Amino acid sequence: MSSHIIYVSLDNSNDDDTHNRTYKTINEALTDIFTIQNITLSIHNRLLIRLHPGHYKESIILPSFVDLEGISKSSVILSFNHDLFQQDYIVKLKSNSSIKNITLLLDNKITYKPEETPEDNTDVKPTKMGIYIENENNILIENIAFIDNNNNKYKNILKAIHLYGGYINYIKNININLKLGFGEIYGIYLEE
């Protein structure tokens, strides 16, 4: 049960009758909650971020005791933002966090910083991950769809979920629909 609920909507709308502030991006909401409002979270004092319908283009790190939940998997999409030099993941989960009711669009477009652009990138295989978990515990992934953009001209490595150490308690109702192009595809990739 969440103690705090905040809303994210691309058009700043909030169809709930509460007077809670609505944010335009997930990162804006996280920044406000942790740096401006300085809320301390715990197992008994959780934060729920509820996403309204839309296509959110951002990479996020979901802190401990934060739950990210879409209104519905069919109406909430999260993907990379190619206007920024983003991380290799869409969502990085920390211990005691959860993600529910969202579609993750794994884009296999290659985005380099100018100083990192290889002369011939035909053999470069950058990794793109939907969800990345590194040495974290007690995580819930529920009702998540992983899809790609059918752009298979790059030799990327696509991973729906990448688990590095730690353990997960629950993965429920996930749908992985990734098509193999020139690269490699993994549904759930386990690394010790």
Image: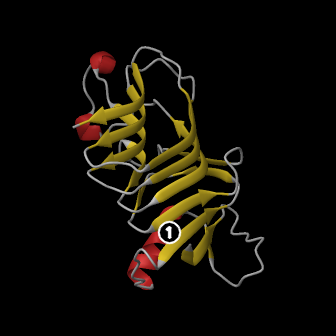
Number of numbered discs: 1
Quick one: label 1, few (<14), some, or many (20+) residues within 10 Å? few
Residue under the image location 25 percent in, 45 percent down: 165
| Quadrant of the frame with the C terminus | top left
| Quadrant of the frame with the N terminus | bottom right
Residue under the image location 29 percent in, 39 percent down: 114
Whether residue 110 is situated above or below residue 21 in the rendered picture: above
Q: Which residue is mark 1?
A: 28
Front residue of 11/114: it is 11
Name the spot of residue 58 as percent of width and height, x first: 49, 52
Q: Residue furthest front?
A: 169
Q: Along the horizontal axis of the image, is 190 left or right of 172?
A: left
Query: Identity of the amino acid at label 1?
Result: Glu
Residue under the image location 68 percent in, 52 percent down: 54
Front residue of 44/9: it is 44
In which quarter of the view is residue 131 placed? top left
Q: Along the horizontal axis of the image, is 73 left or right of 174?
A: right
Name the spot of residue 95 as percent of width and height, x first: 35, 60
